[in-house]
Amino acid sequence: MTTDTPATRPADLPDAIHHWIGGKLTGSADGRTLPVADPVSNTPYTTAAAGGPDDVDRAVAAARAAFPSWSKVGNRERASVLYRIADAVEAHEERLAAWETFDSGLPITQARGQARRAAENFRYFADVVVALGEEAFRAGDQQLNYVVRTPVGVAGLITPWNTPFMLESWKLAPALASGCTLVLKPAEWTPLSASLWPEILDQAGLPSGVVNIVHGIGEEAGQALVDHPDVPLISFTGSTDTGRHIVRSSAAHLKTTSMELGGKSPVVLFADADLEAALDSVVFGVFSLNGERCTAGSRVLVQRPVYEEFTRRLAERADQVRVGPPADPATEVGALVHPEHYARVLQYVEIGRREARLMAGGVRPAHLPEGNYLQPTVFADVPRDARIFQEEIFGPVVAVAPFDDEAEAVELANATAYGLAAYVWTSDLKRGHRVAHAVESGMVWVNSHNVRDLRTPFGGVKASGLGREGGAHSIDFYTESKIVHVMLGEVRTPRFGAS
Ligand code: NAD
């Protein structure tokens, strides 16, 4: 297999991808469409409806109409629907993996994992709402105060193109579990897998209008959702620049927002670490999902005594990573999502050549003459003010730099605008905790790459985001808490105006 052969092109691709509004597949009000291409041939294979304000209006109206009944469905019944969605996602696993692979360029083995994780998101949030209690506070015999949670209303969900279906599920599941209805705006470069939701959600018996999908470009369909007065909440995952813009736009209606944004996450590797385990994790952490991973450990800081050896071995492994057609089960790194993104990553490689020492990759693999392919790339001796140290590349490119002691490691780890994830490798338990606490990031893994526990908060600090989702944090985000104060004893009131 070299490029996009008929064997790798799914047989059942849709002729056109439509919006899904009020339970019906529909085109845009003005009939506009966008071409959708795959990242191997970079030629359009279908079109997606290009939504605008009219389409968003229709979708929000459908979600508003569905809200009164969906929001009143009991928690256990809602959870049953979520379980059925999880089953339906798994029943679609092969097709979903094939479509995701074809549309986004993710290696097929990693696309399969996305379907399982998507199903898990639904099962997990079903369990959360069944187990969820509400707080009560008693002030002796005098007063009882209790909290009721109500779903916020119509949620606006905006998602990026890396792991599209899984990230959509990460927002759909808690929004539905909380009793919200919603409008989803998938990423325009990868709309294919989102076109499976209507079938999956219908199969699971979700009432019409609870979920609505509007495709289209961010500045039109996404912006219309952000600007819509009847959408009180926006959950956004994407780049920091877009996130800033959405927060500014949301201020007009004082919307609740959750921003899961970019990252430039450090791996801090001390000389006493298990270097074999660290090497596997570093390679996987930055090159899996084609390096298009928000939590990628894309800056590797290595303590000086092991710096040369670790960097050399990292480069050797990068050279051996199997880059190939996304649909080939042997492929470890597939094709980057879009020619525009590929050109941006290649531009960073050129910048890196001027800023640092290229140890591996930096070129298209010789056996892959077309498609958005890049051999995993390692730069060493990267100075802290280098652009490849500071800026998110979002491809299979890693920057490596040495440090001498713990203080310098922490300082270097914190020397970027971002603060999403961090990874610490050491066999000194106290130091592991110390560094984990000192690093400015929303999440830290000690002696591991990114292994998620769905109960834990997910999100970043600094330019990596605002707010947390994950576990009960997601339910907090999609619901409003109302406190009800009940006087049980006698109410004592200063008697204004009484004689
Ligand atoms: P992007 O910001 O370009 O687009 C994300 C989504 O926002 C798309 O659906 C796009 O159409 C939409 N959009 C664009 N402009 C908009 C506007 N004005 N109003 C409303 N919506 C708009 O991001 P991308 O290139 O698709 O994704 C890559 C980025 O996402 C990277 O920076 C990556 O780190 C980040 N990401 C973060 C996380 C996380 O959890 N922190 C997870 C995955 C990806």
Image (tube, rainbow, N blue to C red):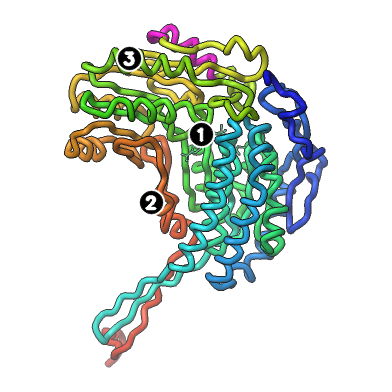
Q: Position of residue 360 (x, y in %)?
A: 44, 12
User: What kind of secondary structure does the magenta stretch mostly adopt?
Assistant: helix
Does the Cβ of the disc 1 residue fall within 8 Å of ligand 1?
yes
Q: Residue at x 72, y 42 (%)?
A: 51
Examine the rendering and report whether any part of residue 252 can be seen: no
Q: Residue at x 49, y 33 (%)?
A: 293
Q: Label 1 amino acid? A: Ser
Residues in magenta? 345-358
Q: Position of residue 361 (x, y in %)?
A: 49, 13
Q: Which residue is mark 3?
A: 383
Which numbered dot is residue 456? 2
Quarter occupied by residue 38:
top right
Q: Label 3 amino acid? A: Pro
Graded by Cα atoms within 10 Å as few (under 14), some (14 to 19) or many (20 or more), the crowding at tag 2 reads some
The mark lying in front, picked from 1 and 2, is 2
Graded by Cα atoms within 10 Å as few (under 14), some (14 to 19) or many (20 or more), the crowding at tag 1 reads some
Residue 320 vs residue 185, the one in the foreground? 320
Which numbered dot is residue 239? 1
Q: Earlier in the sequence, mark 3 or mark 1?
A: 1
Residue 455 vs residue 388, the one in the foreground? 455
Q: Is residue 131 magenta?
A: no
